[in-house]
């Protein structure tokens, strides 16, 4: 760990893990950290090295587990990520090999996932995720950022259920996400629903804000000004 605050981070981990008695888990990946995930698990040699790297790291810093946040398997995320048709097969092979390691066998393993199962080799959501359920303790669904500044209209950040809206506006929801993963073979007791603690702001013109012919009934999914980036309030420090 080469971060200038490494010693403080380590002290915090040890304090959390030992004194507060909660698990300390390292998350690997994320939106800007998934560029080389595909490469890291893409060959037997790379998987061996990756398993060795993470197990040495968790031992060195006395971590309790690992969370894998690969965005996304065989699907572009940030825009410059390495992707491969065999990403999903390679990832489950990595998890199997990690579980076969004496250290990896003891870890709490989780994966942060999108609202649909990982893509198969044909770039379609996989229909069988049962192998992942064998090796992961938890599947954490990221039910947020379903709509945002990149969308064609205003929509809910983290919809609970969108079955009642027009089909064109059904981008996914908590209900459909859980159903998707369960149908693909992940037991409900292994699914955790990620809930957002933030929202997105939009600038909507008056003419778009209301249903045609009214001045009081708000329009669903109105157009918005994409050039206006509204900033929220500052962080509130908690001491």
Image: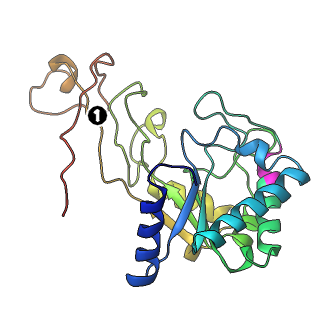
Q: Secondary structure at mark 1?
A: loop
Bounds of the magenta span?
Answer: 86-90
Q: Mark 1 = which residue? A: 220
Q: Residue at x 81, y 42 (%)?
A: 121
Q: Where does the image place residue 13, in percent across and percent down from the top left? A: 46, 69
Q: Which class describes the residues within 10 Å of circle 1: few (<14), some (14-19), or many (20+)? A: some
Q: Which residue of the protein is positioned furthest toward the left in this rendering?
A: 215
Q: Which residue of the protein is positioned furthest toward the right in this rendering?
A: 44
Q: Where does the image place residue 53, in percent across and percent down from the top left? A: 73, 59
Colour scheme of the picture: rainbow
Image height check: is 98 above or below 159?
Answer: below
Q: Residue at x 74, y 78 (%)?
A: 105
Q: Is residue 130 left or right of residue 227?
A: right
Image height check: is 38 above or below 90?
Answer: above
Quadrant of res 220: top left
Q: Is residue 60 left or right of residue 3?
A: right
Q: Is residue 4 left or right of residue 92?
A: left
Quadrant of res 222: top left
Quadrant of res 150: top left
Q: Where does the image place residue 108, in percent across and percent down from the top left? A: 61, 74
Which residue is nearer to you in this view: 37 or 162?
A: 37
- Quadrant in which the N terminus appears: bottom right
Image height check: is 202 above or below 192?
Answer: above
Q: Residue at x 74, y 67 (%)?
A: 130
Which residue is nearer to you in this view: 230 or 99?
A: 99
- Quadrant in which the C terminus appears: bottom left
Q: Residue at x 69, y 61 (%)?
A: 184
Image height check: is 163 above or below 220?
Answer: below
Does residue 133 show up magenta in the picture?
no
Chief SS of the magenta region = helix
């Amino acid at each position: 760990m080469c971060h200038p605050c490494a010693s403080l981070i380590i002290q915090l981990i040890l304090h959390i893990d030992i004194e507060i008695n909660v698990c300390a888990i390292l998350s690997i990946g994320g939106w800007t950290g998934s560029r080389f995930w595909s490469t890291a698990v893409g060959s037997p040699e790379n998987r061996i090295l990756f398993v060795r790297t993470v197990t040495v790291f968790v031992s060195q810093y006395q971590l309790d587990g690992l969370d894998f946040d690969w965005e996304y398997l065989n699907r572009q995320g940030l825009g410059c990520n390495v992707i491969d048709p065999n990403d999903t097969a390679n990832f489950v092979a990595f998890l199997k090999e990690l579980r076969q390691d004496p250290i990896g066998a003891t870890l709490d393993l989780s994966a942060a996932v999108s609202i649909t199962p990982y893509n198969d080799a044909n770039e379609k959501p996989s229909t069988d995720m049962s192998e992942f359920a064998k090796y992961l303790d938890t599947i954490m669904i990221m039910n947020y950022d379903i709509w945002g500044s990149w969308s064609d209209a205003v929509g809910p950040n983290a919809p609970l259920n969108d079955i009642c809206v027009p089909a064109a506006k059904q981008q996914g929801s908590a209900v459909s996400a859980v159903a998707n993963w369960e149908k693909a073979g992940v037991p409900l007791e292994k699914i955790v629903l990620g809930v957002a603690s933030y929202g997105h702001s939009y600038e909507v013109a008056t003419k778009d804000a209301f249903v045609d012919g009214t001045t009081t009934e708000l329009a669903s999914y109105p157009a918005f000004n994409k050039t206006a980036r509204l900033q929220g309030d500052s962080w509130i420090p908690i001491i």
